[in-house]
């Protein structure tokens, strides 16, 4: 008997993920009913609320507990992106863990089946992580006024499995990946990372150092909603502060960090910082306004990081 056990794990914060859980549960039920006699499939879906502050969101998500083999755990405090994922791994019952960001959506009807195929066909093992990638939902409105939308749209060609394989470890993201439970427990996310950003990049670096492979496949989850420009800028700045704090650990794993270091080595970082201080406010006004420019976004990220690295 070939037994397959899958724990689908969703960290949640201030977003309703009931529709996503319903889709995942439906796919799992269908798979369980179609498995051949020599293969038993069991599953669970666990959503851990990481200190959400929106009471209406929490009430909606409580309905997750009414779905068979699903749990909704309210933590009551915000532990951060690393700790909540490590917590979910410990809560899981089955040998394979599928992590999905709760603000994404599954649109492929064979999404769960594709991950099971990756396990069954020998492409994955206890020493391999499978990364499915991300895309933009076909139902997401085209919005060239939204910075996050145009950023993700520009990045789409780099999200294919073929492109991700070119930077196997540096392009690892936590939005959608399968990992063996034993491997996850022995290589937890670094809990020094309390704030937004780069805990996934360091996880990929740790896997590489340990000799663990990452198999990139085209089995994406989809962006369906895009935060406001102001909120996205706040998240970007928080991520850059994380990058500056852990820059020694992340050398070689961030393009903007590598660029900042090159400017420092050739001696023009002070000039770049001075120039950025003069243009920072108007650039930020553009990026939070109705016609954000990606080129200015890249300049802002570099200038902001250079400013942080000077402190």
Image: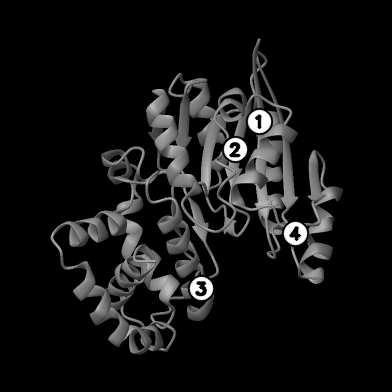
Q: Do the residues labelled 2 and 1 touch (CB within 8 Å)?
A: yes
Mark number, residue 98: 2
Q: Is mark 3 on a helix, strand or loop?
A: helix
Q: Which of label 3 and label 1 is nearer to you?
A: 3
Q: Which of marks 2 and 1 is nearer the N terminus?
A: 1
Image quadrant containing the C terminus: bottom left
Q: Which of marks 2 and 3 is nearer the N terminus?
A: 2
Q: Mark 4 points at which residue?
A: 51
Gap between marks 2 and 1, in whole Å? 7 Å
Q: Residues within 10 Å of mark 2 (few under 14, many from 20)?
A: many
Residue 28 against residue 278 in the figure, above or below: above
Q: Name the residue under label 1.
A: 6
Gap between marks 4 and 1, in whole Å? 25 Å
Gap between marks 3 and 1, in whole Å? 35 Å
Q: Mark 3 points at which residue?
A: 234
Does residue 212 appear anywhere in the picture? Answer: no
Residue at 83%, 56% (x, y): give it. 63
Q: Are marks 4 and 2 in contact (CB under 8 Å)?
A: no
């Amino acid at each position: 008997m070939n037994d397959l056990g899958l724990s689908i794990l969703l960290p949640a914060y201030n977003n309703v993920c009931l529709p996503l859980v319903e889709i995942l549960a439906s796919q799992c039920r269908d798979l369980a009913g179609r498995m051949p006699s020599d293969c038993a499939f069991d599953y669970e879906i666990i959503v851990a609320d990481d200190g959400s502050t929106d009471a209406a969101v929490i009430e909606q998500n409580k309905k997750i507990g009414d779905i068979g083999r699903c749990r909704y755990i309210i933590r009551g405090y915000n532990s951060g992106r690393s700790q909540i994922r490590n917590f979910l791994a410990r809560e899981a019952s089955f040998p394979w863990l599928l992590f999905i960001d709760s603000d994404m959506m599954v649109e492929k009807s064979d999404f769960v089946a594709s991950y099971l195929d990756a396990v069954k066909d020998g492409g994955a093992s206890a020493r391999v992580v499978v990364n499915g990638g991300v895309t933009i939902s076909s139902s997401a409105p085209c919005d060239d006024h939204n910075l996050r939308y145009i950023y993700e749209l520009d990045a789409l060609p780099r999200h294919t499995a073929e492109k991700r394989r070119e930077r196997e470890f540096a392009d690892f993201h936590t939005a959608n990946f399968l990992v063996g439970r034993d491997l996850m427990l022995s290589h937890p996310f670094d809990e020094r990372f309390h704030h937004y950003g780069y805990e996934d990049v360091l996880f990929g670096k740790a896997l590489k150092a340990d000799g663990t492979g990452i198999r990139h496949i085209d089995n994406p989850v989809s962006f369906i909603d895009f935060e406001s420009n102001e909120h996205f800028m706040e998240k970007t700045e928080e991520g850059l502060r994380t990058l500056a704090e852990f820059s020694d650990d992340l050398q070689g794993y961030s393009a903007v960090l590598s660029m900042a270091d090159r400017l420092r080595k050739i001696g023009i970082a002070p000039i770049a910082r001075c120039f950025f201080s003069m243009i920072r406010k108007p650039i930020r006004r553009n990026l939070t306004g109705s016609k954000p420019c990606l080129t200015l976004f890249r300049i802002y990220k570099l200038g902001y990081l250079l400013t942080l690295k000077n402190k």
